[in-house]
Each structure stands twice: as structure tokens, then as C-alpha cells.
Image (spheres, grey):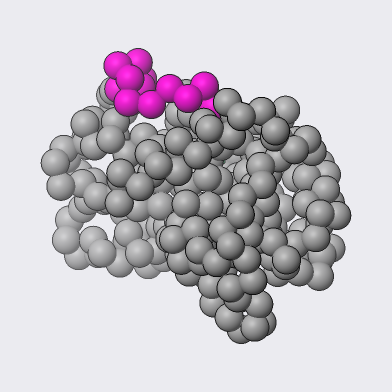
Amino acid sequence: MRIGIFDSGIGGITVLHQALRLLPNEDYLYYADTLHVPYGEKPKDEVRGYIFDAIDFIAEQGVKAVVIACNAATSVAVEDLRKKYDFPILGIEPAVKPAVEKWEGKRKKILVLATNLTLREEKFHNLVKSISREDMVDSLALPGLVQFAENFIFDEDQVIRYLREELASFDLNRYGTVVLGCTHFPFFENSLKQVFPEGVDMISGSVGTAKHLRRILEARNQINEGTGKLLFFQSGCKVEDQATLAKYKELLVMLDAYS
Ligand code: DGL
């Protein structure tokens, strides 16, 4: 059976990329809710409705696990999704803990970049409160990056301009790590590196999520059941258009260059 990977749009491809590295002998169903992206700028209840519809659809296709490869969707729905379905449901959250551990006592702060929905939700506030040094964590919503990504605009002057404007009031020298708390953001690592001082590192939750997926499948003896076959869906419709499929695959190649 396949592994389902779900996001509001193309962001989850950053998680699919890591899953393909760690689990190349699996088949994947990637679902982008392109009709309703961006989730991060919509009310929680509306987004929850979209998520449940999407996961119902994915479940009907037959999956052995689903990764909610979206920080915003994870924060508003993962617990309730787990109650509804009998296959494992994994989520993703901003990688705040490893970032704080790295810089604790070293006079550097952490900057979490995410969507408004993720930053507003209790799950994020609880995560920050659970670490010993709350004062080390600043955050900023960057919905424009989601928009750029959905329009396949990367590394362009306008992205850098947008980032400089949004970050204008921050003293960027204070940060040791930038946490990419939205799965769309790793696509902008090059642009972000141009804006932040040299040496600031970027971390996302995608590697941890892929490792967690592998652990779960191993524990269930459900590993190596496929051949790396990819199926793409957009809001319930199978993507057959070759140009769109080629764009998705180009994104996977683009991510190869980052690591
Ligand atoms: N990729 C999603 C995340 O990780 C959110 C993008 C959106 O606003 O839809 O939070």
C-alpha cells in the first residue's frame, strides 16, 4: 500500500523529498489541496473542513500511513484525525526544540518563520512554553512565501525584496537558527541565506518527520512495499497533465541541490 502525503499545496513536496531519500522503496500519493491553498490565512474551522475532506479522499485510495506535511494543518487537525482513521497519521511542527538546544547559553536567538494560522494556534504556543527558554524564540508570519511558491517563483528579486521588507524591524545578527515552520519555506533557502547574515542555519521539520515515518513503518513491518512510484492529486483530481507533473518533479530536483 501507498504512503499518503498531504499539504495545502506544493509545500509537502519538501517532506516527500526527504521521505523518498529515506524510504525509496515505497509508493506515494501526494495530495495538494490547490483549490483551498493558502490554509495559513483562513479561519481554523474552514481549514479543518478541507483537511477532513482531503484525508477522507486519501483514505479511500488505500494508504498505510498519512503524513500531514503541513504545519498549519497539523496544528488544527492532527489529534482529531488520529481519532477518526485507523492508519497512522503523522504531523509536522516547527523544529523549535533542536534549534533552542543548539543555542541555549550561547547568546543567540531562534526565529520561527511560519504562517499566521500556525503561529496563532495553541499548539505552537504550548511548544514554545514547553522549552526552558521562551525568550529565545521570536516568530514571524510570511504568507507571501506561500504565494510565491504556489506561483513557482523562487530565488527571484521580488522574493528577496519581500523578505527584506518583512524582516526590516528585526536585528538579524541576533539569530543563530531560522526555523522553517511552513513546508513551503525550504524552497526559499537560497533567498533566505542571501538575506540573513552568513552562518545562520536553517532547519525544517521534514527530515525528522521522514525519520519518524520510517520508524513507524518498521515497527509495523510495512516497509519496502513499493518502487518509489508517485501519484499526484490536486483537491481530489488525479494530476494527469504532463506539464504539471514535470513541475512537481522539478521541485524534487531543486531540493536535491539544497542538501
Ligand atoms: N505548507 C503549509 C504549512 O506548512 C501552509 C501553507 C498554507 O498557508 O497553505 O504550514
Left or right placement of residue 173 versus residue 83 in this view: left
Say which of 219 and 47 sits in front: 219
Say which of 23 and 184 sits in front: 23
Q: Is residue 236 magenta?
A: no
Give how far across and how far down residue 49 sits, in percent: 81, 41
Residue 217, image quadrant: bottom right
Residue 90, visible in the rendered structure? no
Give how far across and how far down residue 144 sits, in percent: 47, 24
Residue 72, image quadrant: top right
- Which residue shows up at 16% across the image and 61% down it? 106
- Which residue shows up at 50% across the image and 63% down it? 24
Give how far across and how far down residue 126 sits, in percent: 54, 59
Give how far across and how far down residue 110 sits, in percent: 31, 50
Q: Quadrant of the N terminus?
A: bottom right
Q: Which residues are magenta?
A: 150-163
Left or right placement of residue 72 versus residue 162 in this view: right
